[in-house]
Structure formats: C-alpha cells, structure tokens
Image (spheres, rainbow, N blue to C red):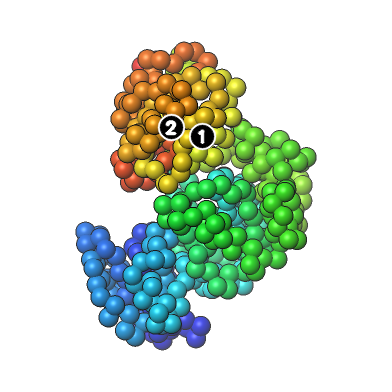
Amino acid sequence: MSEAAPDLPQRALVLGLARSGQAAARALAARGVGVVVLDRNEQLDTRDLGAAGVEIRLGDVSDDVLDGVELVVKSPGVPAEAPLVRASRARGIPVWSEVELGYRLLRPRPFIGVTGTKGKTTTTELLGAMLSADGRVVEVAGNIASPASPRAPITALDPPEDAWIVAELSSFQLEDVHELELEVAVLLNLEPDHLDRHGTFERYRDAKLRIFERARYKVAPRGFGIDGAIEFAGDDPLPAEPRIPGAHNRANAAAATAAARAVGVPDEAIAQALEQFAGVPHRLELVAERGGIRWVNDSIATNTLAVRHGIAAYDAPVRLILGGRGKGEDYAEFARELPASVASIYLVGEASDELAAALDLAGRQFTRAGTIAGAVEQAARDARPGDVVLLSPACASYDQYANFEERGEDFRRLAQNLPE
C-alpha cells in the first residue's frame, strides 16, 4: 500500500456502507489510507471493497475497532448518537461527514451548497444547469440518485481542475463539517423535518444553518434575517419564467438565480436554463395521462411542507395518496389546512393510523388503501376527467420500499399500466 497523502490519516474508519460510505472508503484507499469499514448489515456484498484493500467488519463490534484509527468518516444514515460515534469523540478522534472528506479531496475547486427542507434536488440541478449554460464545467453531487437522474457522492467525483461542484447538502451531511468552505451557500426554506433523527426542530435548524459558517456568499429567503445574505422570494423578477410548475418551484428558481448571479453567471445563461430545465424525477413528475386524468409522481415529498406545495401546484381537483413511514411530524395542522381542492385521500403504509386520526379530527374523509397498488386502483375508480392523482406521501418510504425512488417507480408502473 502506498503512503497516505500528507493531509490524510494513516488509518480511517468509515461508518455505514450505503453509497456515500462505499465511495468514501474507495477514495481513501486509493490515496494510500488504511481503511476499515463497518456496517451492521451482515448481508452486504463487500467483495469490491475487499478487492480494493479495505478491511471489512459487518455486524456488531466493540470499541476496539477504533484502536489506531485517526479519522472516522460517518455516512449520513449514521446518527450522531451512535455508540461508536460517541466513543470516537470521547477518544478525541475527528468525525467527518462524507461531504467534509469530499471537499478536502477536491479543493481548491469552488463549491456551491444547497440545503433546505424541500426543493434541494430541484434547485441543485437547476443551478448546475445555469452554470453549464454559461459554459462552465460542472459536477452535480449529493445523496440522491436514480437511473434517470444520476447523482454521485462527492467522494466519487474525479472532476477536472476547473470544475464547479454543486452539492445538495442534507442536515445529516452538515452535522459533521469542519473546514467546508462554500463559494455560495443556499438555504431554500426551513420547516420541521427529520425530527425522528434530530429530536427537536432546534437541532435540525442548527444543522441546516451550518451551511453558512464559511460561505463567501449566502443566499436565503427574504425575512429569515440571515446576516449578510442575498435574499430571494418566489415573486422576484427573473430573466425568464421557469418551465417547471408550481409557486414553490418559482421560489427555487429565484434562489438558483440569486446564487448564479453571485458567481457571475449572466442573465442570458440563467434564462436559457430556466426555460429548458424540465425538473427531476419523482418531483411533480407527470408519469401518465389516461382519459383526461393526470397521474403525478411526487414520491420525493416526504414531509407535509412538500405536500402542501405539490397540491398548490395544480388548479384542479386532487386525488391525494398519503402515507409510508412517519418522520415525527404532527399531522393535525396539515389535516386541518388541506384545501377543498383535495377531493379524496388514500392512506398507505405504517403512518396510516396517525394520518387517519388527524384527518378524523379535521373532519376529512379518507380511504385506507394499504398499499400504493391499492391506492392507484381506488383512485382510478374515483377520478374524473380533469383530476390529478397525486402521489405526495408526506412520509418516508422505508416501510414498504427501499427508497422513495423505488416507490415512485412502482407508482409510475401502476399508472402507466392502467387501461386507456
């Protein structure tokens, strides 16, 4: 094994072997770092990592795994309170997110970061399109990926030296940044989310706001009071009207425009991107139209704020599919404020009881469909020409699907297989 680079440790531990954890392990091993990886799932296929010289530990292990370790890289899915994370901090071992590692490996390339409760994926892709329209080399990175919208973890990138890195940054990824410096830091919005992980809204908010700690330019919603920020709002004048629908997407476009202008992208390039960008899969994605009924996949909408935005995007009766695995939200206010345009509601998944209780208190009728397939079947019977059947679950997918992409693809398949 070659000697590790001077600014990297001789030995590192990577916690969690999802996409970002595997990418981090490979990136460290390729640079001569001795890497041990740990995941509680004993069924993972780790042959490729083993061939790269990575030491693999699956299942439960003791704190002895930290002996000789100089750095811990924590995957986004690993909580800050995990026993090995706490043990690492107690020993004085630095804990980095995969984003922190990626930044250090790729600097001095300029980084732009986008965070917020909702709209991160759309805004990150749109901002990348604006920079590309200006003729810049761009790598769009983050923890979201699907066959139609590939997105690599930052540590998996190998960009040219003049590339701009535009990264979607979650609260989980921002928990453990230390030297991450952003040319532009964008905050889109802030509503309660991931309370099952962070515990309180205040802790969730504090993680999000870390994006501004070392940013050259800050972009934030008007009224948030972020010191020195370039402010935006959904009714801002834009160089062109965005192709993607919905008032929330106009706000996303305003944020991307402010960020692009901050780094010198001309309005002509911004307008080109706004007019051509069609959106991302699983976000208000029209997947089928049958008999005048539109079937829209909004599987990425995993909290109530995103569902509100999805409903508001349509001036038509909405047949709404809700449910999955709850994320700690109180659904009472959401249920009370559902507009009259929501003509019917179909509940699926683990959160059905919680949602049903809130809807009962709000006097809203609903159907317990159980599964996406059941909801599609019932909605197909109820919907009339001009209606929108909207999968916008307000919940995570992990009770019935591996991820929201798989849930959205299932909805797409079911909708497209309906009779004409």
Pointer 1 residue: 334
Q: Residue at x 57, y 35 (%)?
A: 309
On the image, the x and y values in percent for residue 348 come to 34, 32
Q: Is residue 408 left or right of residue 250?
A: left
On the image, the x and y values in percent for residue 149 come to 48, 46
Q: Residue at x 46, y 23 (%)?
A: 363
The correct choice, above or below, for 237 with respect to 318 in the image is: below
Q: Residue at x 34, y 85 (%)?
A: 68
Q: Is residue 11 left or right of residue 110?
A: left
On the image, the x and y values in percent for residue 208 come to 56, 58
Residue 386 showing in the rendered view: yes
Residue 45 showing in the rendered view: no
Amino acid type of the residue that numbered disc 1 sits on in the rendered structure: Phe
Q: Quadrant of the N terminus?
A: bottom left
Pointer 2 residue: 358
The correct choice, above or below, for 417 with respect to 243 in the image is: above
Callout 2: 10 Å neighbours few (<14), some, many (20+)? some
The label on residue 203 is: none
Residue 85, picture quadrant:
bottom left
The correct choice, above or below, for 306 with respect to 178 in the image is: above
